[in-house]
Amino acid sequence: MHKMIMPRTPRREWLLRCEGPEDEVFTLTVARGAVEVHPPEDYDCVHLELSQIAEFRAALDEAVAQAESDLRARAGLPPALTPPPDTTIPTPD
Protein backbone atom coordinates (compact mmCIF):
# COMPACT_ATOMS: atom_id res chain seq x y z
CA MET A 1 0.00 0.00 0.00
CA HIS A 2 1.44 3.36 -1.07
CA LYS A 3 1.23 6.21 1.43
CA MET A 4 0.42 9.56 -0.17
CA ILE A 5 0.06 11.75 2.90
CA MET A 6 3.07 11.81 5.19
CA PRO A 7 4.19 14.35 7.79
CA ARG A 8 7.12 16.56 6.79
CA THR A 9 8.60 16.72 10.26
CA PRO A 10 8.05 14.82 13.48
CA ARG A 11 5.13 16.03 15.54
CA ARG A 12 6.27 18.16 18.50
CA GLU A 13 3.02 19.66 19.82
CA TRP A 14 -0.34 18.26 20.91
CA LEU A 15 -3.38 20.33 21.97
CA LEU A 16 -5.64 18.40 24.33
CA ARG A 17 -8.96 19.28 25.95
CA CYS A 18 -9.38 19.27 29.72
CA GLU A 19 -12.32 19.96 32.02
CA GLY A 20 -12.97 23.55 32.92
CA PRO A 21 -15.58 26.28 32.72
CA GLU A 22 -14.82 26.87 29.03
CA ASP A 23 -13.65 23.39 27.92
CA GLU A 24 -10.02 24.47 28.26
CA VAL A 25 -7.07 23.24 26.21
CA PHE A 26 -3.58 22.38 27.42
CA THR A 27 -0.42 21.74 25.42
CA LEU A 28 2.00 18.83 25.43
CA THR A 29 5.29 19.58 23.65
CA VAL A 30 8.67 17.99 22.94
CA ALA A 31 11.73 20.24 22.97
CA ARG A 32 15.36 19.11 22.89
CA GLY A 33 14.56 15.64 24.21
CA ALA A 34 12.25 16.81 27.00
CA VAL A 35 8.47 16.43 27.31
CA GLU A 36 6.69 19.56 28.59
CA VAL A 37 3.09 19.93 29.82
CA HIS A 38 1.67 23.46 29.67
CA PRO A 39 -1.65 23.91 31.51
CA PRO A 40 -4.19 26.52 30.41
CA GLU A 41 -3.44 30.07 31.50
CA ASP A 42 -4.22 30.69 35.20
CA TYR A 43 -4.52 26.93 35.95
CA ASP A 44 -2.34 25.04 38.43
CA CYS A 45 -3.45 21.59 37.28
CA VAL A 46 -5.22 19.80 34.44
CA HIS A 47 -8.37 17.76 35.17
CA LEU A 48 -9.03 14.94 32.67
CA GLU A 49 -12.19 12.85 32.30
CA LEU A 50 -12.53 9.41 30.70
CA SER A 51 -12.04 10.12 26.96
CA GLN A 52 -9.58 12.91 27.71
CA ILE A 53 -7.40 10.46 29.66
CA ALA A 54 -7.19 8.17 26.63
CA GLU A 55 -6.26 11.08 24.35
CA PHE A 56 -3.63 12.28 26.84
CA ARG A 57 -2.11 8.81 27.10
CA ALA A 58 -1.85 8.47 23.32
CA ALA A 59 -0.32 11.94 22.96
CA LEU A 60 2.11 11.32 25.82
CA ASP A 61 3.22 8.02 24.25
CA GLU A 62 3.93 9.86 20.98
CA ALA A 63 5.74 12.67 22.79
CA VAL A 64 7.93 10.23 24.74
CA ALA A 65 8.85 8.40 21.52
CA GLN A 66 9.81 11.70 19.87
CA ALA A 67 11.86 12.79 22.91
CA GLU A 68 13.70 9.46 22.83
CA SER A 69 14.36 9.90 19.12
CA ASP A 70 15.75 13.41 19.77
CA LEU A 71 18.05 12.12 22.52
CA ARG A 72 19.27 9.20 20.40
CA ALA A 73 20.02 11.55 17.50
CA ARG A 74 21.88 13.97 19.79
CA ALA A 75 23.97 11.07 21.16
CA GLY A 76 24.74 9.83 17.64
CA LEU A 77 22.88 6.56 18.20
CA PRO A 78 20.85 4.81 15.50
CA PRO A 79 17.05 5.13 15.61
CA ALA A 80 15.20 2.77 17.94
CA LEU A 81 14.07 -0.53 16.46
CA THR A 82 10.41 0.23 17.21
CA PRO A 83 9.22 3.13 15.04
CA PRO A 84 6.89 5.78 16.50
CA PRO A 85 3.15 5.29 15.86
CA ASP A 86 2.17 5.58 12.19
CA THR A 87 0.25 8.82 11.63
CA THR A 88 0.04 8.62 7.86
CA ILE A 89 -3.16 7.94 5.95
CA PRO A 90 -2.77 4.84 3.74
CA THR A 91 -4.20 4.90 0.24
CA PRO A 92 -5.21 1.87 -1.83
CA ASP A 93 -2.75 0.81 -4.52
Image (cartoon, rainbow, N blue to C red):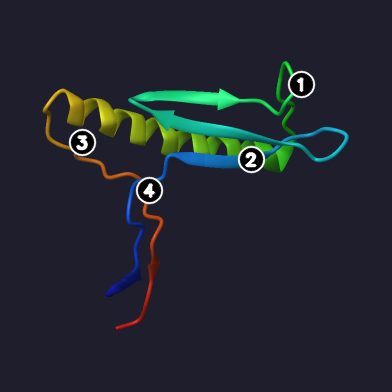
Label 3 amino acid?
A: Ala
Say few, some or many: other residues with alpha carbon within 10 Å of mark 2 (under 14 / 14 to 19 / 20 or more): some
Q: Earlier in the sequence, mark 4 or mark 3?
A: 3
Q: Name the residue under label 3.
A: 80
Label 2 amino acid?
A: Leu
Residue 18 quadrant: top right
Task: Name the residue located 25 percent from the left edge and 25 percent from the top edge.
Answer: 71
Circle 1 — which element? loop
Circle 3 — which element? loop
Q: Mark 1 points at which residue?
A: 42
Residue 75 quadrant: top left
Question: Is 64 placed above or below 7 here?
Answer: above
Judge from the rendering whether residue 28 lies leftward or rightward of residue 74; answer left or right.
Answer: right
Label 4 amino acid?
A: Pro
Q: Residue 16 carries which label?
A: 2
Circle 4 — which element? loop
Judge from the rendering whether residue 53 lies leftward or rightward of residue 82; answer left or right.
Answer: right
Label 1 amino acid?
A: Asp
Task: Name the residue located 36 percent from the left edge and 54 percent from the top edge.
Answer: 86
